[in-house]
Image (tube, grey):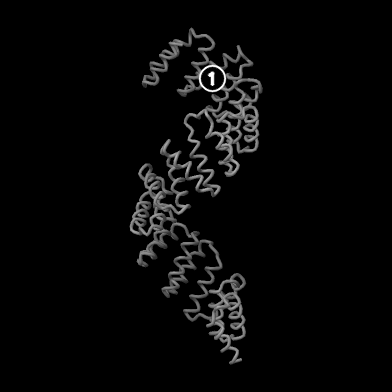
Amino acid sequence: MEAMKEVWKLIEAGEIEQGLRQLAELERKADHQTKYEIAEVYHELGHIEKAKTLIEELLQLYPDEGSLYALAAELLIDLDEEDEAIEMLLEIEEDDEAFLQAQLLLADLYQMQALDEVAEQKLLTAAKKAPEEPIISYALGELYIERGDYQKSIPYLKKAVHSADPIPDANIELKLAEAYSASGQFEDALAYYQIGVKKRLDPNGLFGYGFTAFQLGDMIVAIEQLEALKTLDPDFSSVYPLLAKAYEAEGRLDEAQETLEAGFKIDEHNDQLYLHAGKLCFKRQQPDDGEQFLRQAIALNPGNIEAVQTLAAYLKHNEQFDELLELVTHIRSFGEEDTMFTWYEATALRELDQYEEAAVRYAEIEGFHQDDPDFLEEYAGFLLEDGKRPEAKAYYKKLLQLQPERSDIEELLADLESFS
């Protein structure tokens, strides 16, 4: 209809008010089909109540018309009246042309209500009725991805991606790549990421592409994609730790450090960035900076066990036993507990000649580290220092069972036996 075409031209040209005036004028003398089209335009422009009035009028005249129920349901969804929308969609019969659209809308509504199994059944019903319809295959694939069932999503997404009928505004390749990557099928994922990012530069797609390349050990591609993401969306904070790791894997430590510093500016409260920066500083022979970064990570998140253990290991290696004790006490004040903390505490107490307290701490955790050669050797040495030779011998023997190649321990045991 020419009048509707003119309205659309005005709207597309940005002359919304004039378009609305023409719509109102057209509405007064429109036939029923044109009123439906006017309602669609109102819906598109966000004038929900105007559209709803028209559709309710048409429903009085055509109470069996599924397309009216479907549009009415969409309007109710926009008005946050989901339960009423569901009731409206359930009115659409299976032989109605709008039935498939109704199932798609119902699936979305049930997902919003966390009724994933009901949503799945609606989509499977639609797929059974129209097995070659790509939008239904795509919807099923998306549903399974959102549910974390990536392997199950792949055949549906493959069917959609190879359909002769494209789905407007849907980058199915990126979804399929995501499913393959999450399933650990990185090579298949990479092929679809290559296609998907060419179709549209999507931040999540670029991140997935870079992550997948990283998992495959192709750091050049990973860096290329992650740098592209950083340029496209500098606020995408997850890119910085992964990009830094890629640079580090390539031995480009300065660029890794620069990437982390850029990340601090975007997300100064990201403890993982500080943890990575600390470990990187140790690798770059900058231990003082490394210690400070680790302390910042712990200040941001005392529950960052890796940061705590890395700093504790550094303090132990550096023989900063007073500071090691302070660190364990500080972490425990936040309710954090780990047998490794007790081990570090025992080591520090031993080195500070607080043997009785050290003995208590070692005894607390000996049952947790029976298969750890480092613990067995340290605890056996402590027992030996404390004059408990039989107990020390028992732990050295356990150590030798785990590491039979340790000739030094064998010699030590022989010496202990000779003094028995």
Residue 128, located in which quarter of the rendered image? top right
Judged from this view, the residue extending furthest toward the bottom is 419
- Give the residue type that dot 1 points to: Lys
Residue sitting nearer the eye, 347 or 228: 228
Give the image location of residue 306, x and y in percent.
48, 62
User: What's the residue at 37%, 59% (across, down)?
Assistant: 251
User: What's the residue at 48%, 11% (across, down)?
Assistant: 27
Give the image location of residue 4, x and y in percent.
44, 13
Can residue 105 be seen from the camera position used here? no
Going by the image, does 133 lie left or right of 224?
A: right
Residue sitting nearer the eye, 154 or 227: 154
Give the image location of residue 113, x and y in percent.
60, 36
Residue 101, located in which quarter of the rendered image? top right
Give the image location of residue 191, x and y in percent.
47, 43
* Residue 100 sits above or below residue 116 on the image: above
Which quarter of the figure is the C terminus placed in? bottom right
* Residue 413 sits above or below residue 132 on the image: below
Residue marked by disc 1 = 52
Q: Give neighbour class at mark 1: few <14, some 14-19, many 20+ (Cα, 10 Å).
A: many
Can residue 79 be seen from the camera position used here? yes
Give the number of marks. 1
Helix, strand or loop at label 1? It is helix
